[in-house]
Every structure is written in C-alpha cells, then in structure tokens.
Image (cartoon, helix red, strand yellow):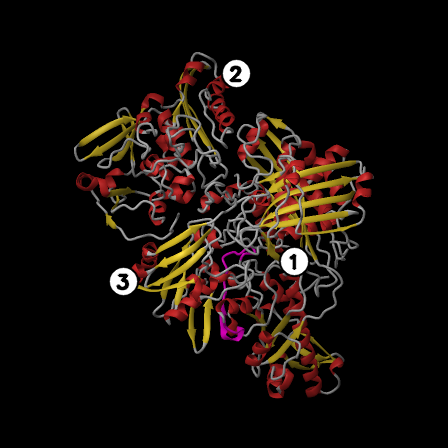
C-alpha cells in the first residue's frame, strides 16, 4: 500500500560514465539507477522498493544526444523523449520512433523521461504497483490472474505466473527498427537486439529487461536497415495523454511498386515483452499493401491468445491495430 | 435590463494571486516551531484495531506525538470519524504521528505495530443485499442522512425474479409516489425497463485537503482547504471540540472541491488536536494518495427505470429504483436526488421512486458536483434516445415535450419552481449546434470512423435562503462587501459581491471584497455548494445593500432635511431627488454613521441574524456605515439550475476511441451575472462530464478489497487532449423572479448535460447500442463494435 512519502536514501551523482560503471561494479546489487525518475520516484515514495542507494545518472553528459554513425544512428540513453520526438534525423529516417516517443505519457514526462528509462521501466500491473507481494515482487502468487482479478490491462500471451505487460511505447518502435541495445559494465560492452533485451516472466519474473545490476543501458543503435521505410505507430489508451497503452503497435514496411518486400510489426501491451509478430511478415510478404492484405495480417496475430477475465477486447483491438499498421503505414 | 455591473465581464481579485503565485493555500502557511503530521491509514478493507504499539516510534529522534481515535471526539455511527479503531475501508485513518518533518513522521508510522482483527467486507451493494451476503459494518449495511444505520437483506426470490440482467427490487429504505403509474403505463405507446450502472469515483481535487493549526490566546487557528468559509465554522469547531467563536478559520484559496470540501471534513481537525496535544503548530499535508482515501467519492448507482412514453414522447409514468453505493459511513443523499431529478427534468405524469443506500468498504462518499442529479442524467438521457428511436421522434422534441417550465412540479410533494426554461435552453442549443443539420451526419461512416451526435439535459437545485448579508461603507468612500461564502475557485463569490455594488450604485474600483479569513469579520453565509451561490449570495448581498441604502437615505434626511423617501442614491452619493445638488458622499455618510452610532455604525445589530454575523458586526462596529440583514426575501418554489448539452463525436469502431468534434453547452441560470465566468463553468463542467461518461474509474478487487486506482494517473480524469476540439456556449438569460437581479446558480448540471450528451453520442455512433453503464471505456466500445460480449456482468460495479 502506498505510503506516498519519500524516505531518505543515499544519493550518488556520478558525472562520468566510468565512475558510474565503477560504482555499479562495486555496489551494483544495492544501487538503483535513475534518470528522469518518472518510474523510480513513485516506487520509492511509495516505500515499496527500498534501494540502499540511488544513482542519478543525469549528470553524465556523454549519454545524451543523437549521433549519426556509419550504419545509422546512436541515441544516448539519456536523450529525452521530447528530443527524440523532435529530432530531425529520427523524424526523417525512423519516424516510427519519433511518433512513439511523442505519444509517451505527457509533455512534462517526455521532457524529463529518457529513452533509456522508457525501455527500462517496470511493469504497471496495478496489484504489483500497489505493493502486494506477488510473483514479480518476489512472492508466490499472482493477484491479477484469479477468478475475480481485475485484469483489463493485462497479458494475452506468454503469461507465466505473472500476467503483467510491457508498458513502453518506444519499445515496439525500437524492435520494429531492429534496434540494438548497448549495455555497458565496468567489464565491457555487450550489444543485444532489442527483441532480446526485453524478457518475459519465464526468463526472469522479477525484471522486464536483460540488464544486470552491474550494467546499464548506455545507448541504442538503430541501423539503416529500415531507414526511410513506411512506418506506422498507434497507441490506444483510455486517455489521450498521461496514460499507458491498452495496446500499441509499431510497424516498419518496405514496399516496392506497391508490393511488400518485408516488414516488422510489433505490439505492446499484450505480453510481458513487446510482441514481435514475425507471422505478419510471413503473411504479407510479396502481397500488395492494401486493405485485403492488411485484414489478413490482422487475423493472424491473435492466435494463441489466452484472455483473462477482463481483457478479451485486446484480441480485436490488436487485430485492428495490426491491420492499420500494414494498411496505413506511410 | 441593462446594469452597470451585472452581466459584464470583470477580473475577480483573487486571480492576481493565482497567476503570480502569491496566493497562499493551506500548505503555504508556516508557523514557528511547526511540526508535521502524517496519518497511518488502514491496509485492510474492514478490521478491528486490537492493539497499537507505538513505543518504538515514540523513541525515534524527532518524533513528538501519536494521536489515536481515543483522543479525538467521537461521533455516533455512521458519521464520518476523525480517526477510527474500526477501519471500514483501505485508507481509513487510524492514527496520526507528529514529528519534526514528514519523512521522520512516516518513518515512525512504519515503526508502529498494529494488531488487526480482519472483518468481513464488501465492495458491491448487491452482494451486501444478498441474503447471507457480507455486511460492510458490524452495525449495519444501510444508512444515510435521515436513515438510521440498519441491516437490510433482500430475499433470494427478489434476486431470482430479476435474473442477472435486471436490478432486483427488494425492500427499499425509502420510497414515494404520486399519480397512478399503472394507469400511466397502460396508456403508454412504448414502455422501457432498463437496468443500469453509473460508477462512482473520487473527486481528485487538485489541492489535497491539507490543513495547519495552532492554538493562541484560547482560540484555535485553522488554515484549511475549503469551498465554504463561514458555513464550515460550526462543524469544524465541533470536530475540534470547541465553540464556534473560539475558531479562527482561514481558507482564502481552494484548489478545487467539487463538493467534497463544501462542509468541513473530519480530518481537517487532526492538526488542531495534534497541536493541542503537542502545544506546537502542526501542519498535515495530505498527499495525492491520501486524497484518494479521504477526499471522498461520488456514490455509484445500480438502478432500474421502467418508463412509459405516449406516442408524442410525453412521459406518462416512471417507476424508478436505485441502489446507491454509499461507502461505509453516512454518505450523501444522491439516491434521493435520483428520484427528485427525474421528477424535475422529465415531469412525468405519474411516478414512483424507491431507493436504498447500501454501505460498502470503499472510501466514504460525499457530494460531488450534481450529486445524484448528474448520475441521473447519465443514466436517463440515453433511455430517452432509445424511446425516441422506437417512437420515431426527434431527440430534441422528446426532451422539450417533457422539459420543465414555469409551471413545473417536482418531487412527490409536487412542489413548484421559481422559474424554469429548460425548453428554451434545448431550443437555443439546437439552434447554436445546428441540430437539424448535425443529426443528418449521425452514423456517417468514413472507414472505421463513424459520427455520433447526442444531447443531454440536466438539473440541480440552485438556491438557498435565510443567510445573512453584510456590507460596510468606510469614511474613505469604499464599499466593503463582506462575504463568507468561500472561494471554491468558481469566482461566484466575486460575481455575487457585485450585486451589492450594483444595488448601491458603486464603481467596482471602489469596492473591496472582504473574505477568506474569519478575522475579516464575515457574515453567516451559505456553503459554496450545490449550484446555489449565485442565487443565495445575490439575495444576501442585496438585502445587506438595501439595509445600507436605507441607512444612507435616513442619514441624508437627518443631515439635509426632509424625509428618507425624498432621497435616492447614485454616483456614490445620496442626494435629494428634487435637488441633486443637495447630497452627501458615501464617504461623508459613512463618517456620519460612525458619529451617529447605533444601527448606523453596527453598535446595534438586527436580532434575527446568525451569531456569527452578530459577532462580525460587533467587531466592525464604529468603522463605517454597516448594512446587515438576514435574507427574508419572498420566494415561491425551488430555484432550479438547468442545462442542455449538444455533442458531436467521431468514434473509431476499431479502437474504441472517439474524438469530440464539437460541444455546445447552454445554461438556464436566470440572469447571467458574469458571462466569461459562465463560459468557464460550461467548459469546465463539460470536461468533467466527459470524465464521468467515458474515463474516470473506481475499481476494487472484490476478493481482497483493495483499490486499483489510488494514483491519479490510474483514475483518469479527462485531460486537455480529451476535451472537445470546438466549444461554444449560450445562456437563456431570463431573470428569475426570486433573485434580486434574476440570477440562479448553474455549476452542477453543466457537468451532467455534458456527460449525458457524450453517452448519447457514443450510442448514436454505434447505431443505437446502449451500454446502460458509465464510464463507457474503449474496451466496451471495441467489444460492442466487434459483436463480442462485455467482460462485466450487467450490474457489476468497480469494473473499469
């Protein structure tokens, strides 16, 4: 239950990445990394998560900004969502990411919220956020998936004890763009495909990403593979601002002479990880980008859905959004 | 009629403080040595506190005191307690801790060990009414104002007869009827029998109900967040356990109340008790989460209406039943307002109303903008549309034929109204919205997007009588308008103050509004609630001004000769009508009033005014010419606030989302006092109605009784981007005969008409699919459009 009062905690404020990584190397298990704080501070003020130390990384200048590389772009983890949504290169080459970033929460949150934070944020299952000792919190039950559980916002797919979903708007766009997540620790760097970065409860029920305590996301690289493709992003939420997606969809489509040569379509809000819908590419590749193809694509995506008490609406919603993501991509 | 001030735009004086940040809300005050206190709130939906061990907490550095329910006044159940040893919902405050800062206080709370005995609970009224169902309190499951706390269970047969889709109609707590409803149904062309749910939800005042208090010279000073000023004093004094005259109450600014801060609320007294215990000033800042717990909520409805229409759409009979979700305590009579509102807005020829307020283990309920009335609008207006479809009638026509006019009757008493022009409002709205053309767009489809149009009409009572007015003209020629009505944020305190200025023909620049602090010697005024300020305060300020005017004329006659009747006022002078050159300025008259003493300077006061006004007059005595009187102006009937809303949306059947393309709101509020402010109210009420119709939620897990939306983002009040793309407004602007310059109140129904218009527009876009439920959220629309069943049962509550 929320306490709504910030406790005292040790605050670390490194200004160099090397210093941050060194701190993590020594104290990774007791340090909570924070950038914009939009996810973090709610946990801490509610006194549900009790980190021994909080490391504010916003002073690390080298993690900020968008850089063009030989093979695409590299976005520093501390680049704000507002900056991403307005960045000319991103808008020109990878518009789906700009659109997704521009639909996150509210202007205030986008001004402080970072891309690194958006992809690293925790689950929004209300039982979990309430502070109940559920599977994801380290307990041995799920309160959302009971005969009377209030689970309208929860998962259709790949639930494994926990039925929480991926809350990020930018994550589907990044997977659609085949982005690479750059993760650093004192021991070095590793790069994960975006769709390997996000993990479901069967892999790690306590975390939504593959980042380890001693590591941090430092950048996101987007290869030119999908630059200039047709894109589509749509988020359906109850409110038009400051709300999480019921379902969102991102697509990148290569079309030549009206025929789809390849595509990547990803849905958020339907499983613990953004759901990369490889099946859509199998269905639409070689077909014209039109209503018929799109409708066919939509019909394929809900196979295997296991609706809970209150979320079967996500089946038609997801089907409709995928249809639009093919038909209306521009 | 044209006035100098009434009907003209102006800048209310408190705006400057708000835009510059100089305005001081309760949380902005500080006092030397001030402690902070925090509440320990129940983690359980219903429990008995068996043991409190605060020994560790009290030993912590910086912790000063713990205050428990045993140390504060107790009020007989089912009144809202200040603190409790039998928490009745998750978040019910059990004790408070004072410390040198809030972090320390919260750390101390975490060190307190409480032994609870868990007790049965319920979050669904129908579950509680079921034979053998859970009961929210140990001492009953039904209560409200005027209904004693008792246990009522319906029979299994009641439930079986109704089936799952209709509201069972077991024993009500109250009922009334007029006319012959059976005969009415027999002559009806169409009879509908509709069960519905209107969800209750929290108020979410932007300013949480923070309070600070200290004791000085035997008086308790409270800096609070309140819609009402003078009206709050007796109740708050009772919560503190002192006499009203020993309370100094400062509430200059209020960051929203929506009804929940209209009367004093129990937790406002916690800092006062803690300050007494610690002998230090105490601030209790209420957090956003705590505001969810103690900030009250609107009562939810599970209802059923059988309604008969003649061929021409006239409603001939209504049989209405409502089960209100009352929270665990006394609640508010929303359930009664359901019946009363139907009787007013639709003027049925015969009607029966039955109702029962059922206790649940959810936050305590209080009035929220149009309590009961706006739920009624959201539930009833789509039923009118359904009937119009069956009868082949226009949707404006089916409303106007039933709309109240000056001959309207309401309630089972068949009471009258002072005036009513809902038909005019509907017709004005139809013209401004261009209903005839817009309705042709209904159902027009472009891809997955379809146009829907809807109309809503709504009502709330809009005026009280019997309060006092107090004005003062000082020797510098200024008119001081003392207003104790409070400042909810609607600026009506200022608009109605202009009634006194208009009546005394004063320039607005020469007027000073005295308010927001009982030390400014304010009169006993109405609570700033229920759409009544414009009417009620117009009357009090008018009678005070008239008293001042009589005294001005009398002084002029004394000083300049002749009789009082020979004189008139104008241009801030009292002058001889036959020779305007013979005059006294207000400044001079005020000086003379001081010299004359007695009633002129407030040394003597009328006998029939409230003790609070009397004390204010006594304190002001000798400082100017005092105008003071109790409102005893003639009144015949109930002043109503009536409103009509017209909305056009574009609904996406694939996503369940819609965009509000246009909204037109029309007020029937008598004479418009302050046009710009009325426009703000129509827009603000309109946006709040959007929340009620389609966004705001109040969810509880029925198995463990915990709330799913304690955080503001989870509650989903309408945001800027959910507001209409295009907004317009109008007013009937016909004077009410019972109000000195013709004004009636209007705040409440401006929300109800918008909520109803949106509900109707959504159903219209879906070709006449009626959800019989609010809020209508995207998943319901997606399911309806896809031909899928809804996830919730027809009468289920706390679902979205």
> Cα distance, mark 3 to mark 1?
53 Å
Q: Is residue B475 visible?
A: no
Q: Do tag 2 and tag 3 residues touch (Cβ < 8 Å)?
A: no
* Along the viewing direction, whichever of B244 and B405 lies nearer the viewer: B244
Secondary structure beneath dot 1 equals loop
Q: Residues within 10 Å of mark 3 (few under 14, many from 20)?
A: few
Is residue B389 found left or right of B204 in the rendered image? right
Tell which circle, 3 or 1, labels the residue nearer the N-terminal end. 3
Q: Quadrant of residue B733?
A: bottom right
Is residue A14 found left or right of B521 in the rendered image? left
> Cα distance, mark 2 to mark 3?
71 Å
The magenta-colored residue range is: B242-260
Does the stretch in magenta take in B161?
no
Q: How many marks?
A: 3
Secondary structure character of the magenta stretch overall:
loop
Question: Measuring 51% from the left and 18% from the top, which residue is drawn there?
Answer: A295
Q: Residues within 10 Å of mark 2 (few under 14, many from 20)?
A: some
**Which disc number belongs to residue B745?**
1
Pointer 3 residue: B61
**Residue B641's x, y, as percent?**
68, 54
Q: Are marks 3 and 1 on the same chain?
A: yes
Q: Quadrant of residue B502?
A: bottom right
> Cα distance, mark 1 to mark 2?
56 Å
Q: In this rendering, is residue B97 above or below A291?
A: below
Camera-nearest label, 2 or 3: 3
In the rendered structure, the residue with mark 3 lies on which chain?
A: B
**Which disc number belongs to residue A292?**
2
Does the stretch in magenta take in B253?
yes
């Amino acid at each position: 239950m929320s306490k709504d009062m910030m406790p005292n905690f040790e605050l670390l404020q490194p200004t160099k990445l090397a210093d941050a990584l060194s701190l993590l190397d020594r104290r990774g298990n007791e340090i909570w990394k924070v950038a914009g704080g939009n996810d973090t501070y709610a946990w801490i003020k509610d006194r549900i998560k009790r980190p021994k130390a909080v490391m504010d990384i916003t002073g690390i200048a080298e993690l900020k900004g968008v850089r063009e590389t030989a093979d695409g772009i590299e976005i520093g983890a501390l680049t704000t969502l507002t900056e991403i949504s307005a960045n000319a290169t991103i808008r020109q080459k990878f518009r789906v990411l700009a659109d997704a970033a521009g639909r996150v929460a509210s202007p205030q949150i986008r001004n402080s919220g970072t891309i690194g934070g958006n992809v690293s944020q925790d689950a929004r299952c209300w039982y979990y956020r309430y502070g109940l000792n559920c599977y994801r919190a380290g307990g041995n039950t799920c309160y959302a998936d009971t005969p009377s559980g209030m689970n309208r916002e929860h998962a259709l797919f790949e639930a494994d004890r926990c039925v929480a979903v991926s809350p990020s708007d930018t994550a589907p766009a990044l997977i659609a763009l085949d982005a690479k997540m750059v993760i650093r620790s004192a021991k070095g760097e590793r790069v994960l495909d975006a769709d390997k970065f996000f993990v479901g409860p069967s892999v790690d029920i306590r975390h939504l990403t593959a980042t380890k305590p001693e590591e941090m996301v430092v950048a996101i690289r987007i290869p030119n593979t999908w630059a200039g493709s047709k894109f589509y992003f749509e988020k359906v939420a109850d409110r038009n601002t400051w709300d999480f997606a019921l379902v969102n969809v991102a697509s990148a489509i290569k079309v030549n002479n009206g025929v789809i040569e390849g595509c990547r379509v990803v849905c958020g809000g339907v499983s613990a990880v953004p759901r990369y819908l490889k099946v859509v590419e199998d269905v639409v590749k070689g077909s014209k980008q039109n209503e018929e193809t799109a409708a066919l694509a939509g019909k394929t995506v809900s196979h295997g859905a296991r609706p809970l008490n209150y979320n079967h609406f996500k089946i038609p919603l997801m089907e409709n959004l995928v249809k639009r993501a093919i038909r209306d991509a521009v | 009629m044209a006035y100098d001030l009434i009907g003209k735009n102006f800048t209310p004086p408190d705006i400057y403080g708000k835009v510059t940040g100089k305005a001081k809300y309760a949380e902005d005050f500080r006092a030397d040595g001030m402690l902070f206190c925090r509440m320990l709130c129940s983690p359980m939906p219903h429990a008995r506190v068996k043991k409190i061990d605060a020994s560790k907490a009290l030993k912590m550095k910086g912790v000063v005191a713990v205050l428990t329910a045993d140390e504060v006044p107790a009020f007989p159940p089912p009144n809202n307690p200040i603190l409790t040893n039998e928490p009745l919902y998750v978040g019910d405050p059990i004790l408070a801790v004072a410390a040198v800062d809030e972090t320390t206080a919260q750390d101390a709370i975490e060190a307190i060990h409480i032994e609870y005995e868990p007790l049965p609970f319920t979050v669904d009224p129908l579950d509680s009414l079921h034979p053998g169902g859970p009961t929210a309190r140990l001492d009953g499951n039904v209560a409200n104002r005027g209904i004693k706390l008792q246990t009522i269970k319906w029979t299994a047969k009641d439930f079986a007869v109704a089936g799952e889709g209709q509201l069972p109609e077991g024993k009500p707590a109250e009922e009334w009827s007029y006319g012959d409803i059976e005969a009415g149904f027999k002559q009806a062309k169409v009879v509908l029998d509709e069960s519905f749910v209107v969800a209750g939800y929290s108020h979410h005042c932007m300013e949480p109900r923070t309070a600070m208090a200290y004791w000085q010279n035997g008086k308790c000073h409270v800096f609070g967040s309140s819609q009402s000023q003078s009206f709050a004093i007796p109740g708050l004094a009772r919560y503190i356990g002192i006499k009203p005259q020993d309370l100094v109450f400062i509430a200059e600014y209020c960051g929203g109340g929506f009804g929940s801060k209209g009367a004093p609320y129990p937790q406002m007294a916690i800092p006062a008790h803690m300050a007494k215990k610690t002998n230090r000033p105490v601030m209790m800042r209420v957090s956003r989460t705590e505001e969810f717990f103690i900030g009250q909520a609107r009562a939810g409805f599970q209802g059923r209406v059988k309604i008969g229409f003649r061929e021409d759409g006239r409603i001939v009979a209504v049989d209405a039943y409502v089960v209100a979700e009352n929270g665990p305590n006394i609640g508010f009579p929303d359930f009664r307002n359901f019946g009363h509102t139907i009787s007013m807005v639709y003027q049925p020829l015969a009607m029966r109303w039955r109702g029962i307020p059922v206790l649940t283990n959810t936050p305590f309920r209080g009035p929220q903008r149009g309590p009961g009335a706006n739920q009624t609008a959201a539930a009833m207006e789509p039923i009118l549309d359904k009937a119009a479809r069956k009868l082949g009638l226009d949707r404006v026509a089916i409303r106007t034929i039933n709309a109240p006019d000056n001959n309207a009757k309401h309630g089972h008493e068949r009471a009258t109204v002072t005036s009513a022009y809902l038909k005019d409002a509907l017709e004005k709205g139809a013209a401004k919205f261009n209903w005839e053309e817009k309705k042709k767009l209904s159902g027009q489809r472009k891809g997955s997007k379809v146009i829907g149009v809807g109309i809503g009409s709504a009502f709330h009572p809009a005026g009280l009588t019997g309060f006092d007015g107090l004005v003062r003209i000082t020797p510098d020629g200024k008119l001081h308008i003392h207003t104790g009505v409070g400042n909810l944020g609607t600026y009506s305190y200022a608009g109605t103050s202009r009634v006194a200025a208009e009546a005394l023909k004063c320039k607005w620049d020469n007027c000073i509004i005295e308010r927001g602090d009982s030390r400014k010697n304010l009169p006993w005024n109405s609570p700033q609630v229920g759409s009544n300020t414009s009417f009620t305060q117009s009357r009090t300020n008018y009678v005070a001004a008239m008293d001042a005017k009589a005294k001005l004329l009398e002084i002029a006659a004394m000083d300049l000769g002749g009789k009082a009747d020979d004189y008139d006022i104008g241009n801030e002078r009292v002058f001889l009508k036959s020779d305007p050159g013979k005059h006294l300025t207000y400044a001079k008259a005020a000086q003379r009033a001081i010299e004359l003493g007695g009633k002129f300077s407030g040394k003597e006061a009328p006998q029939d005014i409230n003790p609070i006004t009397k004390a204010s007059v006594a304190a002001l005595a000798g400082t100017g010419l005092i105008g003071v009187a109790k409102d005893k102006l003639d009144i015949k009937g109930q002043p109503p606030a009536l409103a009509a809303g017209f909305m056009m949306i574009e609904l996406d059947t694939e996503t369940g989302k819609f965009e509000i393309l246009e909204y037109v709101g029309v007020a029937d509020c008598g004479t418009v006092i302050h046009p710009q402010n009325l426009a703000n109210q129509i827009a603000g009420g309109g946006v709040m109605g959007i929340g009620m119709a389609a966004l705001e939620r109040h969810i509880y897990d029925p198995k463990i009784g915990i709330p799913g939306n304690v955080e503001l983002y989870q509650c989903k009040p309408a945001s800027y981007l959910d507001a209409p793309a295009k907004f317009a407004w109008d007013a009937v602007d016909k004077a009410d005969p019972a109000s000195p310059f013709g004004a009636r109140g209007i705040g409440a129904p401006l929300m109800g008409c918008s909520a109803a218009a949106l509900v109707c527009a959504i159903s219209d876009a879906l070709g006449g699919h009626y959800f019989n439920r609010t809020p209508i959220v995207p998943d319901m629309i997606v399911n309806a459009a896809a031909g899928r069943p809804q996830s919730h049962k027809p009468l289920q509550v706390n679902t979205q």
